[in-house]
């Protein structure tokens, strides 16, 4: 386990040494989103019965921050190692593909949860939040961070240049996140867009996470848990196979 622990520690230090960029900046961005959207739409956007828009928005911003930063951690680590040429020092030790997967994904989870916790701390005082089902909050936070950390690992393995990684993030991760119900309830959308939104796995992460706060959601939380678990299992299987074969890593 020494190799796994060392790689995991290295990945934690990698983002912690630049915490102003990797932790503080995303927290400030989420706070600005809340101040702008909450002030402008608090009295105009209908959400759940008895829930004000600002309170509705906070869990969405927390989870959005978790997802985006989990993805950014694992993907940026691999692409930087490829471009600077130090990836060889990760591949030379006798680390199994499972150890590589666990170290990168766990570090991504740590960063995602750290940013999410920071966003919650600086925004929670702006609204009255309840914790109807705290276990659901923890489950979806961990699953969401793990899923996006795994997706970031896949993107980092696949990409060979920074612009390829940026395309992956800008044309897949960002749209899927913003169209997942962070800023609105799916019940406010026309029927056809509600149907389309149900094909977005990020929607189930945020909807299930929000259920833990209010006990209300757009779909059954058990359905959300099933969809997210299956999607994570598929991504994890793909990532492990890519690591096992050395895809774009050992050429």
Image: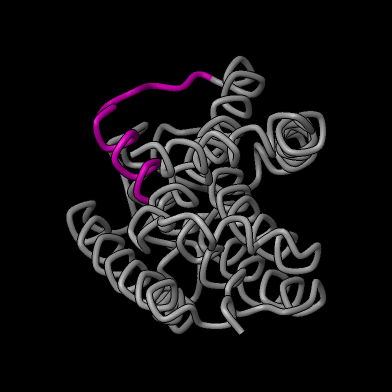
Whole-percent x, y for residue 217 in the image: 32, 49
**Is residue 134 highlighted in magenta?**
yes
State whether residue 56 appears in this view.
Answer: no
Residue nearest the viewer, comparing 198 with 104? 104
Residue nearest the viewer, comparing 41 with 214? 214
What residue do we see at 28% from left, 27% from top? 134
Residue nearest the viewer, comparing 90 with 105? 90
Q: On the image, which quarter does residue 49 sit in?
A: top left
What colour-coding does the image apply? one colour
Whole-percent x, y for residue 165 in the image: 72, 73
Which stretch appears magenta? Answer: 128-143
Circle count: 0
Residue farthest toward the top in the current orientation of the protein: 125
What residue do we see at 62% from left, 75% from top? 172
Whole-percent x, y for residue 96 in the image: 35, 60
**Is residue 131 highlighted in magenta?**
yes
Q: On the image, which quarter does residue 125 sit in?
A: top right
State whether residue 174 appears in this view.
Answer: yes
Instruction: Please tell me whether the stretch drawn in magenta is mainly helix, strand or loop.
Output: helix
Q: Is residue 251 above or below residue 50?
A: below
What residue do we see at 49% from left, 40% from top? 8
Left or right of 194 on screen, residue 22 = right
What residue do we see at 37% from left, 71% from top? 235
Q: Name the quadrant of the C terminus.
A: bottom right
Left or right of 36 on screen, residue 30 = left
Q: Name the quadrant of the N terminus.
A: top left
């Amino acid at each position: 386990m020494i190799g796994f622990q060392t790689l995991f520690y290295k990945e934690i230090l990698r983002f912690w040494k630049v915490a102003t960029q990797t932790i503080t900046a995303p927290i400030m961005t989420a706070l600005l989103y809340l101040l702008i959207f909450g002030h402008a739409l608090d009295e105009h956007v209908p959400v759940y019965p008895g829930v004000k828009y600002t309170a509705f928005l906070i869990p969405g911003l927390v989870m959005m921050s978790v997802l985006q930063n989990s993805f950014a951690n694992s993907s940026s680590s691999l692409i930087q190692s490829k471009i600077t040429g130090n990836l060889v020092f990760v591949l030379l030790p006798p680390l199994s593909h499972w150890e590589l997967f666990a170290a990168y994904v766990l570090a991504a989870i740590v960063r995602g949860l750290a940013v999410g916790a920071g966003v919650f701390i600086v925004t929670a005082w702006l609204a009255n939040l309840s914790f109807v089902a705290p276990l659901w909050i923890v489950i979806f936070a961990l699953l969401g961070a793990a899923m996006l950390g795994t997706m970031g690992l896949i993107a980092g393995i696949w990409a060979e240049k920074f612009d390829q990684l940026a395309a992956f993030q800008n044309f897949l991760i960002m749209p899927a996140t913003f169209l997942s119900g962070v800023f609105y309830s799916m019940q406010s959308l026309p029927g056809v867009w509600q149907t389309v939104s149900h094909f977005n796995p990020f929607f189930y992460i945020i909807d299930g996470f929000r259920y833990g706060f209010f006990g209300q959601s757009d779909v059954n939380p058990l359905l959300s848990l099933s969809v997210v678990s299956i999607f994570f299992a598929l991504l994890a299987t793909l990532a492990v196979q890519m690591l096992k074969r050395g895809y774009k890593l050992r050429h």
